[in-house]
Image (spheres, helix red, strand yellow):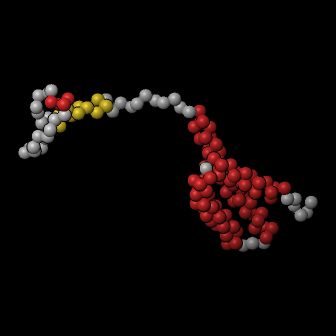
Amino acid sequence: MLITRRLTAPAGSQPTQQSPVAAGRAATDDAWVSLNLEPAAPEAADPKRWRTLAVTQVAGFMTLLDVSIVNVALPSIQRDLGASAGTVQWVVSGYALAFGLALVPAGRLGDTLGRRRMFLIALSAFLVTSAFPARRRPSGC
C-alpha cells in the first residue's frame, strides 16, 4: 500500500533556503511525501529459531509437570507425615515461593553468564534434583 500526502508550510512561515536539488524545481511551499506500507520481503527463517522455541516449550511443560507432580504427591506426603491439610498447603506454598524467588536471580545470571549456558545449568540442576528423590528406596523395602 502506498500512501501519498501533500504537506504544506504553515501560513505566514518564512521560506527556507532550498537545497541545490530543490532549487531546480519551481519554488513552492508545498511538498509531497510518499510512505510505502508494504511489508518488507521476508527474511529466510533461521531453523535454530524453531529448535529454540521447541526447547523453551519443553522447559515450560516440565515446570508445569513438576508442579503437578507435587500436587499429586500431596496425599502421600500428608499420610506419611501425619500432617493436617493446612500443613500440606504450606508445602505447595513453599514450593511456589521457592520457585518464584529463584526466577529473578536466575534471570540475572542468564544475563550475566549467557542465557544458553544458564538454561543448561538450570536444566541439569533440575534433572539431578528430580532424579535424586526417585533413587531413594521406600523404607519398607
- Nearer the observer, 120 or 67: 120
Residue 41 coordinates in the image, percent (x, y): 43, 28
Quarter of the image where one finds residue 72: bottom right
Q: Position of residue 28 (x, y in %)?
A: 11, 33
Find the residue positioned furthest to the left: 12
Q: Considering the image in quadrants, where does the C terminus appear?
A: bottom right
Q: Is residue 5 left or right of residue 120?
A: left
Query: Is residue 65 visible from the viewing direction of this image?
Result: no
Residue drawn at the location 53% of the way across and 31% of the way down: 45
Q: Nearer the viewer, residue 73 or 37?
A: 37
Total label count?
0
**Which is nearer the eye, 3 or 92?**
3
Indicate whether 24 appears above or below 134. above
Instruction: Tell me: residue 133, above or below residue 30.
Output: below
Residue positioned 10% across, 31% down in the render: 27
Q: Position of residue 125 (x, y in %)?
A: 72, 55
Instruction: Name, please, the residue furthest toward the front.
Output: 20
Q: Residue at x 72, y 73 (%)?
A: 84
Residue 136 is left or right of residue 42, and the answer is right
Residue 128 in which image quadrant? bottom right
Q: Residue furthest top?
A: 24
User: Does residue 13 sit above or below 48 in this rendering?
Assistant: below
Is 51 rendered above or below residue 126?
above
Depth order, front residue of 30/90 = 30
Q: Position of residue 50 (x, y in %)?
A: 59, 36
Q: Residue at coordinates 65% horizontally, 49% vertically from top-left?
A: 117
Question: Visible in this render: residue 74?
Answer: yes
Q: Dividing the image into 4 quarters, which one contains the N terminus?
A: top left
Answer with the quarter of the image where residue 135 lies.
bottom right
